[in-house]
Image (cartoon, rainbow, N blue to C red):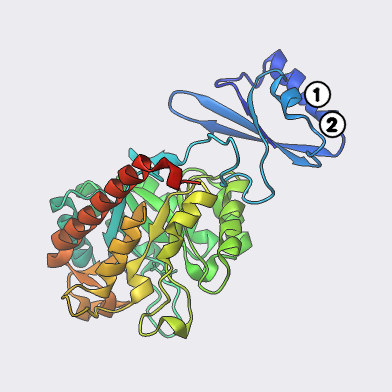
Amino acid sequence: MILILSANTDPQGAEYRQLLAHLATLPGIQTRVHVERGSEKTLTEIYLIGSTKSLDIEDMRRLPCVERAVRVSEEYRILGRHKDDQRPAFFEYNGVRFGQDTLHVFAGLCAVDNPEHVEMMLQALRDNGQVCTRMGAYKPRTSPYAFQGHGKNCLPYVFELAGKYGIKVIAMEITHESHLNEIKEALHQTGNPTGVMLQIGTRNTQNFELLKIVGRQTEMPILLKRGFGITLDESLNAAEYLASEGNRNVVFGLRGMKTNMGDPHRNFVDFAHVPVVKRLTRMPVCIDPSHSVGSRQAAPDGILDMMHVTAQGVMAGANMVLVDFHPAPAKALVDGPQALLLKELPYFLEDVRIAREAYLKRVALAQRYPNARQ
Ligand code: PEP
Ligand code: MN
């Protein structure tokens, strides 16, 4: 059960202390307090853990400071959607809103190779009105002999150039806790010209110790990719690890499943789960057409498979698209064959816009047929 307290409840106040004292007397119940400091108000939620079945929800609602009490199922307590749960399904970071109602494209380099390519990419984004990008500095590679990313050495120029071109948020994968400090330090040293969304890659979805460490920091939001060989429920629980440590600004990323049933695509595209994740949780949902399809193959209609699946995901309500671009894919150090070209950026964005419009029209249509909704 979650007790949602009145906005701006004073943690030093007598009423609040009275509430905590009462909760401490409940047998078999432990409490966990989560405080969310927004720009205008501070929200406090108290999670009651243990045998809450015997608690009467009306009694709990009458306790001092309590505005609402929500009975949650065992699953995804913090990030999940529960009956009568009106907690928000969005967050803001560095002036950008990420929600189940918004859409952002994160086009960029799979792996940073040199400052020239980073600058060409960022300039193209700025020229096309984009404020988000992806930039890989730490690359988890199948072979130990493959390029592992420039790591912390590239961070200063990546961040400075991002600031120069008005980029607000960079999705950047980290594979070790030390990377978190390297990113924080580089942001600090360059004067915070941009923001970072920490990406947990599919190989680390169930690296619980990494999840706990990343979840404990609340400065930067997190993009958690679905694990490529585990169930959706297991991946959603991984997201809950982040939230249970304190960071609930989490975007959930679909990137395809590893199985040869998806051949000839690199992974079996799983964007049919966009509405499922939105129904089960309050997380915005990201799709990654590059790592799921993995090639520039096109259909007879002239449209790349990557663009077809992007449109499918966006038309199903996706909130974020993570996509590889490169100014010179033949020279890319990682994943060149799946990169889109800079000259394809306006085309890609227009295609996404068409799909988004279709999605919004579909939502309006569904509202005209309320009986079809269960
Ligand atoms: C990536 O986005 O660069 C990446 C390695 O993705 P994934 O973890 O989905 O393989
Ligand atoms: Mn890649």
Q: At 52% from the left edge and 60% from the top edge, which residue is drawn?
A: 178
| Residue 315 in view in this figure | yes
Residue denoted by label 1: 22
Q: Under 8 Å from ligand 1: the CB of mark 1? A: no
Residue 270 image label = none
Residue 59 to residue 98: above or below: above
Write down the quadrant of residue 13 in the picture.
Answer: top right
Give how far across and how far down residue 227 sits, in percent: 52, 68
In the image, 206 versus 306, the foreground residue is 306
Q: Are marks 1 and 2 in contact (CB under 8 Å)?
A: yes
Q: Amino acid at mark 1?
A: His
| Residue 113 in view in this figure | no
Image quadrant for the N terminus? top right
Q: Is residue 21 left or right of residue 353?
A: right
- Density class for disc 2 (Cα within 10 Å; few <14, some 14-19, many ≥20) is few
Residue 108 to residue 193: above or below: below
Q: At 33% from the left edge and 68% from the top edge, which residue is drawn?
A: 289
Q: Helix, strand or loop at disc 1?
A: helix
- Density class for disc 1 (Cα within 10 Å; few <14, some 14-19, many ≥20) is few
Residue denoted by label 2: 26
Q: Amino acid at mark 2?
A: Leu
